[in-house]
Image (cartoon, helix red, strand yellow):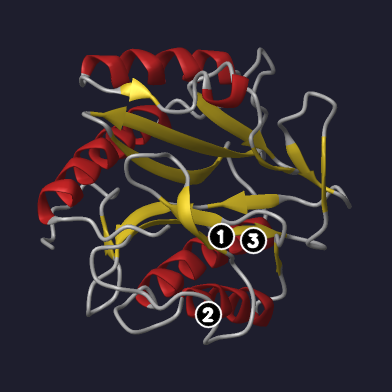
Amino acid sequence: MTHIRSHQEVEKIRESSRIVYETLQVLKDSVVEGMTGNQLDTLAEEFILSQGGRPAFKGYMGYTATLCISINDTVVHGIPDETEFRNCDIVSIDCGVLKDGYYGDSAHTYVVGKVSDNVQKLLDVTEQSLNIGIDKARTGNYVSDIGHAIQTYVEENGFSVVRNLVGHGIGTALHEDPQVPNYGDPGQGIKLKSGMCLAIEPMVNEGHHETYTKPDGWSICTKDGSLSAHFEHTIVVTDDGGTILSNGVYNGY
């Protein structure tokens, strides 16, 4: 079941998403050589609680941390630990917040020190593919138009889109209908309506799109060991394209 959110509901999702955005802002300067995922996780939880929110991931289906921290070939759902970040690592941080019954969700991939031009291109293409997908989240389009636009841009730039993981609706649950794949033919699935709230999140691999899950049951990695980047925003569908709720900017709805 898909939901059309009222203005009041969108504002509650925006508030949870604001906390997510500000959490990532707090963390970004700490993604440095020698830092650990556990240290970032502690910082994130303390900040979220200080804002009146709750970590959305902690306790979700048995997950034990506040953040998902996915390094290099880990696509998503990496569990924070005591591994120290190294120069040239890429670190994807996914954060979710629950406040007043509504969720926000966002992710960003950071670099530790300096990376090669091709690795920087991977990050830039992934982030731009998110922006392209958000632009397609407009009234009258189909949900698959989002993924088609993302896939087309990513593959034109020589990378691949992960296919067994998708974006999702968001609101009073962390994951709601509809699923939002990052690939596929246009004109498929549900028709988008103003007020739908979605978490759009391209996961893009430097190599092949296939993945596997580590024995911890959570960490999903590229099958060929190539690097992977992940960017995500919570948005609301409008007549003019998606309005981002998780970028710290109030641009109306």
Q: Which residue type carries mark 3?
A: Asp
Evaluate whether residue 33 shows in this view.
no
Report the Cα–Cα distance between label 3 and label 1.
Answer: 20 Å
Say above or below: 112 vs 128: above
**Which residue in the protein does label 2 denote?**
149
Report the Cα–Cα distance between label 2 and label 3.
Answer: 24 Å
Snapshot quadrant of residue 89 = top right
Q: Position of residue 181 (x, y in %)?
A: 59, 65
Snapshot quadrant of residue 14 = top left
Q: Is residue 200 left or right of residue 15?
A: right
Q: Is residue 242 left or right of residue 225?
A: left
Say above or below: 238 vs 61: below
**Which residue in the protein does label 3 denote?**
117
Residue for point 40% across, 78% down = 191
Say above or below: 41 vs 206: above
Q: Position of residue 109 (x, y in %)?
A: 53, 45
**Which residue in the protein does label 1 denote?**
202
Q: How many marks?
A: 3
Q: Position of residue 90 (x, y in %)?
A: 63, 41
Residue sitting nearer the eye, 223 or 253: 253
Q: Nearer the viewer, mark 2 or mark 3?
A: 2
Kind of element beneath mark 3: helix
Residue for point 82% across, 57% down = 210
Asked whether the beta carbons under mark 3 and mark 1 sit within 8 Å of each other, the answer is no
Q: Which residue type carries mark 1?
A: Pro
* Label 1 CA crowd tier, 10 Å (few <14, some 14–19, many 20+): many
